[in-house]
């Protein structure tokens, strides 16, 4: 297969150990490591070893970043972590390595090299392979995000006060009062609310933000926001707010005179004037083809900020600084489209808060700047394997573990569905597959999220926005009761690493040095030093 990348040199890095400076230009470098979005990298990108996909003139091709020597391992966050009593390692090698006193498992096999996990009970360890050996010590400690599970809510769809029928375009009328009500009910199986944008905007989903520093009056304004915060606090729920900084809305006062990439100034000013005069539905009929300015995925309503300009970076930093006192964490929309170095500066006011970035591919070059991401690698693996067999599911879990650094695993947002994809009930079918999926999410390190309605087994498609139907309570849902049980088990250590997957008698076994979890179509078995707990589906 053609290779569309060339390693110019290797340089030392405190997070990755070493990274390859990969020439893949000219122009924007786009691949699975950017989620196929423009903006994060120009001409070249710095990548740790791995197998990536890159968009080139001839289409999508493979880019293999092979380590210059084997075994490839460093005592750094990307490749090792101390869980407290056990150390988890990632080792790149063309043959099975040895780690005296530890257990080694092949997580992902490649043509040039494989990625191995090793688990040892000591902070000093040795790696042997390929005719060489090396000693290491003091890997970094794997932290805790302080959140066990999140409940995801799209504010407008928290209730149907307006009798909406066209789910693509119409406001349904949910308010922050409704958000508080459904979130408090979900506190049975979550300790944080992941809340979609609440800013004044042009659309019901509010990703085309008009003012980053206000709460939309349609949702009840600032008074409703403060009341919601009080309700969440009394229920023991933290607040993780979706923040949109890759782009703004067409009616945002910052556009077009601010830091944007404008290709045709006259045409852009005309579009802006039309946006001020016409309703969104009329604009949607008029605006076709390529916009005269850079946007999010050629969506005219979402002009993209140009982060090569310092005023864009400063604007984003001010937005984070403004909201930081009001929330416990942030979800960064289209995080994979903003350069990692920009995120390091922009997120400085959010220190100490849980931060996760949206990334629909392999976030490898971003982990140094943002600790956790939406785990699409795991989502895609599970959604495509849960209806097949235990071997396929175990392979999907191990591939995800191979591509995710130990220090990031507790911070990753794991999910079976969200507002951008088809409902899991529609993709997976029966109750057994849904239950297995959630049992696996709650058994793996990370922050699992339940998308509003998911606890009810709601169906729906992303293509027609039926995956965003207004919330309907389901007090007798068996799935919600299972989520309650899984949530309680996490306080006993369920989901604490290090662990790896294997198939055993048609079930998925998640093994670690301290616990054992088996997940099958009939239930989950969790064993630890306090005994064995069986949960039937």
Image: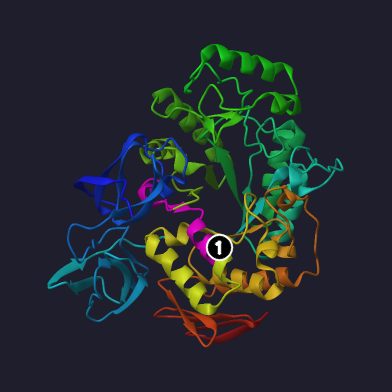
- Residue sitting farthest toward the top: 266
- State left or right for residue 248 relative to residue 51: right
Residue at left offset 51%, top offset 73%: 393
Furthest-right residue in view?
Answer: 163
Relative placement, left or right, of 413 versus 28 is: right
The residue depicted at 34 percent of the width and 76 percent of the height is 105
**363 is within the stretch colored magenta:** yes
Q: Position of residue 363 (x, y in %)?
A: 42, 51
Percent position (x, y) of residue 311? 43, 23
Q: In which quarter of the image is residue 506?
A: bottom right
Query: Could you say where residue 351 lies in the image, as x and y percent from the top left?
Result: 43, 44
Q: Does the magenta stretch include residue 380?
A: yes
Q: Quadrant of residue 167?
A: top right
Q: Is residue 32 above or below residue 459?
A: above
Q: Can residue 212 be seen in this view?
A: no
Q: Residue at x 70, y 53 (%)?
A: 461
Reading the image, the residue beneath label 1 is: 148
Badge 1 marks a residue whose secondary structure is loop
Q: Where is residue 497 in the image (x, y as percent from the top left)?
A: 43, 71
Left or right: 431 as drawn, with respect to 476: left
The quadrant of the image that shows the C terminus is: bottom right
Q: Residues within 10 Å of mark 1 (few under 14, many from 20)?
A: many
Query: Does the image show residue 7?
Result: yes
Residue 435: name its quadrant: bottom right
Q: Where's the N terminus, which quadrant? A: bottom left
> Range of the magenta residues?
362-382
């Amino acid at each position: 297969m053609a290779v569309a990348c060339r390693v110019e040199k290797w340089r030392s890095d405190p997070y990755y150990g070493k990274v390859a400076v990969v020439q893949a230009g000219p122009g924007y470098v786009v691949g699975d490591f950017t989620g196929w979005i423009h903006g994060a990298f120009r001409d070249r990108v710095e990548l740790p070893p791995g197998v990536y996909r890159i968009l080139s003139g001839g289409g999508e091709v493979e880019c293999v970043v092979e380590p210059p020597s084997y075994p490839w391992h460093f005592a750094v966050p990307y490749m090792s972590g101390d869980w407290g009593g056990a150390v988890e390692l990632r080792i790149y090698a063309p043959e099975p390595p040895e780690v005296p006193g530890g257990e080694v498992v092949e997580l992902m096999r490649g043509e040039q090299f494989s990625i191995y996990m090793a688990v040892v009970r000591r902070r000093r360890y040795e790696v042997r392979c390929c005719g060489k050996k090396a000693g290491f010590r003091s890997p970094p400690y794997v932290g805790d995000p302080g959140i066990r599970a999140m409940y995801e809510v799209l504010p407008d769809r928290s209730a149907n006060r307006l009798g909406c029928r066209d789910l693509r375009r119409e406001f349904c009328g949910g308010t922050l009062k409704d958000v508080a009500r459904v979130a408090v009910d979900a506190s049975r199986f979550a300790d944080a609310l992941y809340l979609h944008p609440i800013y004044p905007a042009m659309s019901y989903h509010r990703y085309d933000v008009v003012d980053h520093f206000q709460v939309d009056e349609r949702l009840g304004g600032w008074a409703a926001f403060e009341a919601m915060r009080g309700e969440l606090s009394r229920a023991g729920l933290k607040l993780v707010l979706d923040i949109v900084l890759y782009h703004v809305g067409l009616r945002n006062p910052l556009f077009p005179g601010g830091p944007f990439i404008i290709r045709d100034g006259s045409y852009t000013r005309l579009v802006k004037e039309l946006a001020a005069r016409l309703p969104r539905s009329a604009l949607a009929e008029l605006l076709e083809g390529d916009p005269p300015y850079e946007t999010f995925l050629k969506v005219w309503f979402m002009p993209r900020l140009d982060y090569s300009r310092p005023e864009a970076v400063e604007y984003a930093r001010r937005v984070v600084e403004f909201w930081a006192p009001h929330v416990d964490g942030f979800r960064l929309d289209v995080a994979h489209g903003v350069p990692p170095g920009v995120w390091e500066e922009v997120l400085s006011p959010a220190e100490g808060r849980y931060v996760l970035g949206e990334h629909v591919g392999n976030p490898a070059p971003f982990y140094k700047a943002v600790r956790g991401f939406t785990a699409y690698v795991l989502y895609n693996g599970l959604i495509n394997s849960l209806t097949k067999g235990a071997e396929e599911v175990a392979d999907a879990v191990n591939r995800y573990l191979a591509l995710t650094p130990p220090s990031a695993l507790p911070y990753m947002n794991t999910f079976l569905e969200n507002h951008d994809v088809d409902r899991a009930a529609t993709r997976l079918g029966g109750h057994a597959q849904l239950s297995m999926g959630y049992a696996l999410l709650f058994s793996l390190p990370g922050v699992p999220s339940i998308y509003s309605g998911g606890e009810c087994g709601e169906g729906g498609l992303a293509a027609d926005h039926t995956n965003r139907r207004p919330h309907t309570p389901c007090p007798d849902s068996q799935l919600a009761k299972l989520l309650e049980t899984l949530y309680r088990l996490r306080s006993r250590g369920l989901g604490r690493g290090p662990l790896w997957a294997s198939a055993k008698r048609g079930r998925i076994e998640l093994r670690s040095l301290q616990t054992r979890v088996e997940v099958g179509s009939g239930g989950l078995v969790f064993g630890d030093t306090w005994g064995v707990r069986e949960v039937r589906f």
